[in-house]
Image (cartoon, rainbow, N blue to C red):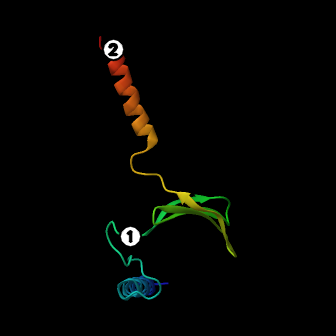
Amino acid sequence: MDMGNYLRFVFALLFVLGLIGALSILVRRYGFGMSNQPIRKGQDRRLSLVEILPIDTKRRAVLIRRDEVEHLIILGPDSETVVESGIASPTSSTADDSDFAQALENASAKGKP
């Protein structure tokens, strides 16, 4: 093979890769398929994904929060199972933080005469 065949191969490969890249940009820009953008933006969103835990190669546990209530779901290749629904969502100030602050206040009060 001469150098012309190698150059033709390289240019054909670059052309095909460029077409694939252009197609992926068009798909992202014009939203073929599902949209990645949430309908609601900011803090007023009602639905969020809290955590995903792989169970095995085919199943995973998903914790979803909706309106400050969490739902535990097992997702598999052919089925979805709600394990627990209506789990109370932890608040921003957890009990551990307030217990620690309370313990510090008690310790400082005992140290003072």
Question: Residue 104 vs residue 62: left or right?
Answer: left
Q: Tell me the residue at 35%/75% (across/down).
A: 40
Q: Pick the residue in front: 2 or 85.
A: 85
Q: Position of residue 73 (x, y in %)?
A: 62, 65
Of residues 63 and 15, the one nearer the viewer is 63
Dot 1 amino acid type = Arg
Residue at x-position 37% and y-position 86%: 22
Mark 2: amino acid: Gly
**SS at badge 1:** loop
Residue at 33% across, 65% down: 43
In this view, the mark in front (1 or 2)? 2
According to the picture, the residue beneath numbered tag 1 turns out to be 45
For label 1, the crowd category at 10 Å Cα-Cα, with few meaning under 14, some 14 to 19 and many 20 or more, is few
Q: Quadrant of residue 24?
A: bottom left
Give the quadrant of residue 76: bottom right
Which residue ends up furthest to the top in the rendered image? 113
In the foreground, 48 or 59: 48
Q: Which mark is residue 111?
A: 2
Under circle 2, the secondary element is: helix
- C-alpha span from label 1 to label 2: 47 Å
